[in-house]
Every structure is written in structure tokens, then in C-alpha cells.
Image (cartoon, rainbow, N blue to C red):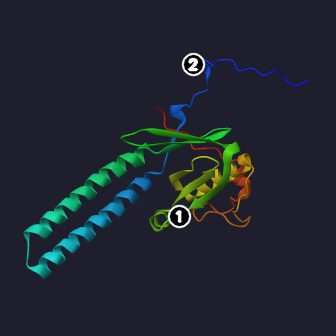
Amino acid sequence: MSERFTNEPMVVDDLPRLHHGAFVSVDPRYVRGQLAGLAGSAVVVAGIAVVVSWQSGAVLWPAIVGGVLVFALVASAILAALEARRIAYQLREHDLSLRSGVIRHRTETIPFSRIQHVSVGRGVIERFLGLATLEVSSAGPDIAVPGLSLADAERIKQVVAERAGVDDETPDDQTPDDEPAGRGRDARNDWAPPTPPAS
């Protein structure tokens, strides 16, 4: 005999909640990387403005355009720094959550049961800083957790892959570049998220 269907109301106060004190902030080097990239762009814009001014003989309009662009980059740098400080993740027994957003605060949660693929990506600046981005694809929205140390990104990737039942593409003999010698796959199995700072 099939189980009787029920559809009882749920009390919101009784539902499980995310522990905001348990979110783990990204590596501080991520903030420096974001600012370095924008500073480089500002230098390029200022250089172009100087060259155009010198070639054309005009001074006023290249200075105005260059000043506006540099101001926009400075504003972007401030927002990027605030955003980087806001980004944090929380890894629980059955899901992964990402907190982000400065003007509009967002908290995204993906259950392991819906995850289809997990990987670690690294851009040029991330490789220079020893950082990585955890990229998670799911049956719904995808999320990316930037600003992780390479070792943490690889360990979280393996934990998520095991809990989600998806393939871990990391070769058995490959360990992160900044992982201490002698620590490999066995050590990752015992990994636990960093302890969030005391509030």
C-alpha cells in the first residue's frame, strides 16, 4: 500500500538556517589581485591619454576623457575591494553556499544532489598569487567561489565531488603547487573548512 500523501504547512521559524558566523572569507590575496588588475588598467588609460595628447597637440579633451576613465576605474576598484571582502562560502554536509554582493546582498545555495560538475580554474593573476576559483555546475544556477588558495580549492573540489557523486578529474599523483610535500589525496579526505574568525 502506497504511503498516504500529505502536504502540511511548514513554520518558517522551524526551518534550518544558514549560520552566518560560519561563512569563510576568501583569501586576502584576492583583494590585492583585484586592485592590482584595476590599477594596471588605470595606468594604461592614463598612458593612452598622454600619448593622444602629445600626438594631437590637444591637452584639454584627452585630459578630461582620461580623467573620467581613471575616476571610473577608481570607483570600480573601491566596489571590487568591497565585493571581495563580502565574498564568503559555507560548506555543509549536504550543500555549498556562496555569499556575495555589495549593493545587493546575495546568498546562493546548491545542494550536492543537484551538482553535475565541479572544477578548479586559474587565471593569470590567480596563478601569480597562488589562488584559484572553485567552479560548480548544477542542474540550476552555477556558482563560482573565487579567491581560494590552490590547496583549499582542490580539497573542497574533492569533498564536493565525493558528496555529489561526480567524477574528480584530479590525477592521483597531482597535488597543488603550494601544498606541502607528502600531503596528497589521503590528506584531502580529512580536510575541514577553515575556522571562521570569531565575531
Residue at 31% x, 54% y is 77
Residue at 61% x, 23% y is 15
The residue pinned by badge 1 equals 122
- Amino acid found under the numbered disc labelled 2: Asp
Mark 2 vs 1, N-terminal side: 2
Residue at 82% x, 20% y is 4
55 and 21: which is toward the camera: 55
Left or right of 87: which side holds 143? right
Which one is closest to the eye, mark 2 or mark 1? 2
Residue sitting at the far bottom: 55
Category of crowding for the residue at label 2, using alpha-carbon neighbours closer than 10 angstroms: few (below 14), some (14–19), many (at least 20): few
**Tally of numbered discs:** 2
Res 35 quadrant in image: bottom left
Category of crowding for the residue at label 1, using alpha-carbon neighbours closer than 10 angstroms: few (below 14), some (14–19), many (at least 20): some
- Amino acid found under the numbered disc labelled 1: Arg
Res 76 quadrant in image: bottom left
Q: Tell me the tag on residue 13.
A: 2
Residue sitting at the far right: 1
Assess whether mark 1 and mark 2 are in contact (beta carbons under 8 angstroms). no
- Residue 191: % across, % down: 66, 47
- Residue 74: % across, % down: 26, 55
- Residue 198: % across, % down: 48, 33
Residue at 68% x, 49% y is 159
Vertical placement of residue 62 versus 168, above or below = below
Left or right of 153: which side holds 199? left
